[in-house]
Amino acid sequence: MGIDRDPREMTFRPMPILTGLSLISLAILYMLGSWQYQRYSEKIDRPPLEADLAAVVSSLEIEIDLSHPGNIQQVYGFADSEPVWRRYAPGRVIPSDEPVLVMVEATGGATPVPGPIASLPSTIAFDGILAVRERNTSAFNAQDNPEQDQWYTLAPDKIWRNLELENVPRVAEPVVMTVRNAADLSQSRLTANPYAFSEPIDSLPPERHFGYALTWWGMALGLIGVYVALHRARGRLKF
């Protein structure tokens, strides 16, 4: 004897693979949205970025030691998603006369442009920071090549010794750096220096994080709508 079903009863026969993938995708989208909302909540009560920068950035004027017979020390890195070689030289802060290793400029491209320290300008002025930098090693970094004045990690003590100088200096880093075209050094552009701070300062405003959260959650709702529509079209979901 059959069981009479209420014609108003909903029937649902989920497609197993689609359901499994959809649940995984929903969980990922929800977590991404929650993460962005958490970033929004963390930033909304913080002081503005300008206050963070004002606490550590100062106007610096540095005299480059052009009498040094050595070559420019170059450190590999990335800026604006392209490889660059940051160019460092010994100098002294004006007027304190403190010795520093100063980042003068950078050249774009994977190939460094060697040159003597004497080829650099005699003084450089910028808004930047003075900080002690520790060696940041990674198993994925290439091997430093002091003989060629090329480095893959910023190690002020080793660079200083490679220049045959005494004392471990602080590092002077501009907030905005000049990136020169390696093929034509007369061509240059200005860009934010991603290595100016020991920890990157996140310049993304909180409203952007809130927008990203809504985007991820909106995609989750859209996925639910597609899932329901597909099951109805296949006759697996009836009301």
Image: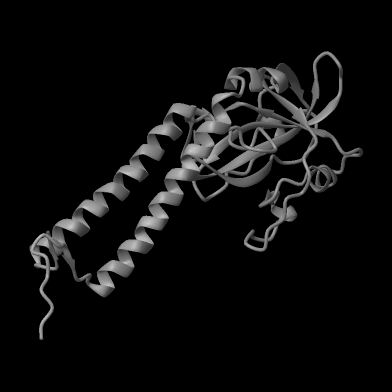
In this picture, is 97 found above or below 138? above
- Along the viewing direction, whichever of 104 and 114 lies nearer the viewer: 104
Q: Position of residue 87 (x, y in %)?
A: 65, 38
Q: Quadrant of residue 145?
A: bottom right
Above or below for 56 versus 137: above
In-front residue for pair 29/62: 29
Indicate the quadrant where residue 157 lies.
Answer: top right
In the rendering, at what x and y percent does residue 195 appear? 63, 37
Query: Looking at the image, which residue is at 35% across and 59% down?
Result: 25
In screen coordinates, is 195 left or right of 213? right
* 170 lies left or right of 235: right
The residue furthest bottom is 1
How is this picture coloured?
Answer: one colour
Could you tell me how many numbered marks the image carries?
0
Task: Tell me the quadrant of the picture where the N terminus can be found.
Answer: bottom left
User: Residue 219 location in percent, x, y?
Assistant: 30, 47
Looking at the image, residue 51 sits to the left or right of residue 192; the answer is: right
Looking at this view, is 172 or 22 the one in front? 22
Residue under the point 74% across and 55% down: 147
Residue at image position (50%, 44%) is: 35
Q: Hey, which residue is sitting farthest front in the picture?
A: 1
